Image (tube, rainbow, N blue to C red):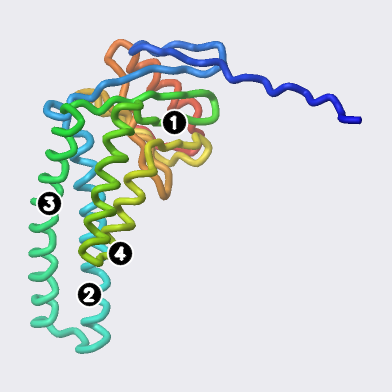
Amino acid sequence: MEKNKTPRKRQPTIHCDYSVRLYEDGKYHWMYDLNMLKNPSVLIEVYWVLGVTVAIFAIIMLAIQTCSDGLDPQGFGFVLEITGIMAAILLVLGLLGYLVYAAVAGWTYSVHFIMDEKGVEHRQAPRSAKVAKRIGALTTLSGLAAGKPGVMGAGMIAANRTSMSSDFSAVKKVKAVRWMDTIQVNEPFGRNRVYVNKDDFDFVYTFILSHCPKAQNH
């Protein structure tokens, strides 16, 4: 005889707008459309990631140089020259990649935010997520055709990562950048950007800051 199964409780469907509101699931929801021509927030994040990549490359090259030739000024100069060339190439490629993505996305990056006492989730709206998946798939295929596993891996990550969550208990820094409608929520190994319209900016900023006991604010 089969046991009676307890029916699963359905999660309510949330249809939110651009105002921050508390919904029946006990969480705050809102939408934000970022104009990728006027707001450079995403481009800045791209360059931050590329900057970290260049810095790691330079540190590895300097370590190899020091181990092989010691403190040789000529060797250091060569490493700095190579690093500079790499940085210039990534600067151009980063901008071109951003413009291609922005154009395909219609110059708008749409995000759905979900926030409660534990954290905040940055979730790409369906249209933006679809664009990210397409570009990620193209990147994966180009990496496969060129025989470059690194490019393939980057494409697979881009295609599958359409959301990011921040745990307030782990957040170390909260920074308000009002002219970009942006609140930076940074954990030790994660950076989240919360976009919110000016009418609700102070409420969201105060809410996040008050729920991040370890955070420094700026």
Quadrant assignment, res 159: top left
Separation (CA) of disc 3 from disc 1:
29 Å
Residue type at mark 2? Met
Q: Residue at x 33, y 26 (%)?
A: 111
- Mark count: 4
Circle 3 residue: 93
Upstream in sequence: badge 3 or badge 1: 3
Upstream in sequence: badge 1 or badge 2: 2
Q: Position of residue 68 (x, y in %)?
A: 23, 88
Q: Is residue 200 above or below residue 160?
A: above
Residue type at mark 3? Leu
Residue type at mark 4? Pro
The label shown at residue 149 is 4
Mark yes or no: residue 218 visible. Answer: no
Separation (CA) of disc 3 from disc 4:
18 Å
Separation (CA) of disc 1 from disc 4:
30 Å
Quadrant assignment, res 113: top left
Separation (CA) of disc 1 from disc 2:
37 Å
Upstream in sequence: badge 2 or badge 3: 2
